[in-house]
Image (cartoon, grey):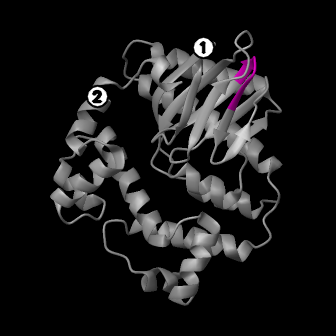
Amino acid sequence: METQNDTLISQFLADLKPELVIAMLSKCKPNWAKPMFTPTYSKIYYIESGEGRLTVGGQELFPQPGQMVFAPAGLPQSFSATHPERTYQKYWCHFNSNISFMNLFTLCKLPYGLTMDDPSGVIAAFERLVTASKSQHGPAKSIRIQAALLDLISCYMEQAVLETPKASSTLTSSKLSAVLQYIDINLIKDMSIAELAEQVHHHPNYFIRFFKNHLGVTPMTYIYERRMEKAKQLIMSSDMPIGEVARATGFHDIFHFSKTFKKRLGVAPTEFRSLYSELHFPKEQHLN
């Protein structure tokens, strides 16, 4: 029987469009480390051997061989080697997506690290992903990359659901899912707390507490994050003029949009597009 988490995850992933940044199999150096930072891309690791330490969203992890780690974009993270002679050998990839995995993990209480029942399937998906990303340009390259990346994500999600305690309230999950879908459909327009509360028949004051208790942020903060994520995705995946990107993500003033985007990501939208095009496959030492 399909559980409420199955249904909720299916709803989130139905329109998933991931875009690979980089994929590799590599051996970490003895000085492999990075202090707390908040990446705008999601990361997946599969540990083949070695040891190390990661923190994701405030949780400390010490992944072992045969385990995977999924670190969603937008969550504070850090990593470091724990022994200079036994550093990780791992498959890893970074990718962007049109959905917020951070909110999916929070809402469904999914683990950031887990042991895979079928590691051979994960390795095969990673090998296809790495091979496709390094191949010469061709008409089917993007399809091969996306197919392998989707396979990898599905391996993790299916295992995560098996290991996640069943949530106690189907009604709560249904209400949250309805609100999140409503927000995504209406990102182009202004939305009020009263309007969102009406979708689930809650008083506005209660709705704010209800939303923050389950997602960790206020409704307006969530809308802001989704608009920034959608804008980033449109800039990376299309030639849409920046003014149209602004309007498509609910910003009526291109100057306000550019200022907000730069404050959030550190560069203006046009600079971000240029940097993304030039650094689509960044060097391993900066991003692994």
- Label annotation for residue 277: 2
Amino acid on which disc 1 is placed: Ser
Looking at the figure, which quarter contains the C terminus? top right
Tell me what residue is drawn at x 47 percent, y 79 percent: 196
Q: Residues within 10 Å of mark 1 (few under 14, many from 20)?
A: some
Tell me what residue is drawn at x 67 percent, y 34 percent: 54
Chain-order first, disc 1 or disc 2: 1
Image location (x, y in percent) of residue 146 = 50, 32
Q: What is the span of residues highlighted in magenta in the rendered image?
A: 47-53
Tell me what residue is drawn at x 69 percent, y 39 percent: 156
Q: Is residue 77 left or right of residue 160?
A: left
Amino acid on which disc 2 is placed: Ser
Image location (x, y in percent) of residue 68 = 71, 32
Residue 72 sits above or below residue 195 on the image:
above
- SS for tag 2? helix
Q: Which residue is mark 1?
A: 26
- SS for tag 1? strand
